[in-house]
Image: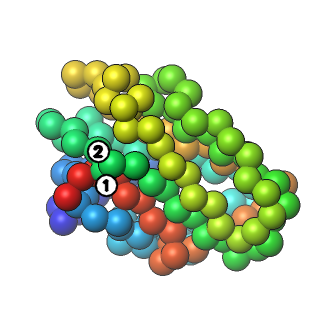
């Protein structure tokens, strides 16, 4: 796998994909650590940038899986692809969330040069996402 470039700015993690990953890959494998995935505010913003990939072929159900250390009551998840909301959901009680995306919606919203998937997550309190137990599976093998 060509190394992805991870940018971490105040309140945002940006992962620039140089090539499609052909399997489920952990956030740790993408270069993120426990410290970088501690969100004191309870708000997460992750940008998955596909600009450097010429021919986007998505996994049948593009999936984001997040496991966190704390037990959470209700969490709110929103995903935008190229500035259009493609998912808005609440998850109840637990230590993990699976976000299933609609491949057809993503394909329909694809642009020629710039393609970004932005994940927003809101937790009721500070959260520690586990990079070894959290995964993305976005592209077809």
Q: Is residue 113 left or right of residue 30?
A: left
Q: Is residue 14 left or right of residue 89?
A: left
Dot 2 falls on a residue whose secondary structure is strand
* Circles 1 and 2: CB atoms closer than 8 Å: no
Q: Is residue 89 left or right of residue 19?
A: right
Q: Is residue 71 left or right of residue 110?
A: right
Question: How far from the left and from the top, in percent, is residue 15?
Answer: 38, 51
Question: How far from the left and from the top, in percent, is residue 131?
Answer: 51, 72
Going from N to C along the chain, the mark reached first, 1 or 2, is 1
> Residue at the spot x=70%, y=76% of the render?
69
The Cα atoms of the two marked residues, 1 and 2, are separated by 20 Å
Q: Is residue 62 visible?
A: yes
Residue 108 found in image quarter: top left
Dot 1 falls on a residue whose secondary structure is strand
Mark number displayed over residue 5: 1
> Residue at the spot x=80%, y=72% of the render?
71
Question: How far from the left and from the top, in percent, is residue 2?
Answer: 17, 61
Mark number displayed over residue 58: 2
Q: Nearer the viewer, residue 93 or 52?
A: 93
> Residue at the spot x=80%, y=64% of the render?
93
Q: Nearer the viewer, residue 14 or 136?
A: 136
Q: Residues within 10 Å of mark 2 (few under 14, many from 20)?
A: some
């Amino acid at each position: 796998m060509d190394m992805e470039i991870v940018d971490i700015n105040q309140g945002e993690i940006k992962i620039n994909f140089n090539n499609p990953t052909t399997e489920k890959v952990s956030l740790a494998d993408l270069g993120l650590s426990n410290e970088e995935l501690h969100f004191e505010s309870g708000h997460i913003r992750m940008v998955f940038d596909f600009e450097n990939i010429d021919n986007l072929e998505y996994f049948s159900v593009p999936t984001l899986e997040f496991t966190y250390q704390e037990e959470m009551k209700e969490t709110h998840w929103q995903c935008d692809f190229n500035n259009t909301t493609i998912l808005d959901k609440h998850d109840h009680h637990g230590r993990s969330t699976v976000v299933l995306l609609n491949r057809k919606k993503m394909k329909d919203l694809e642009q020629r040069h710039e393609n970004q998937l932005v994940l927003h997550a809101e937790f009721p309190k500070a959260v520690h996402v586990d990079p070894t137990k959290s995964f993305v599976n976005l592209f077809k093998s």
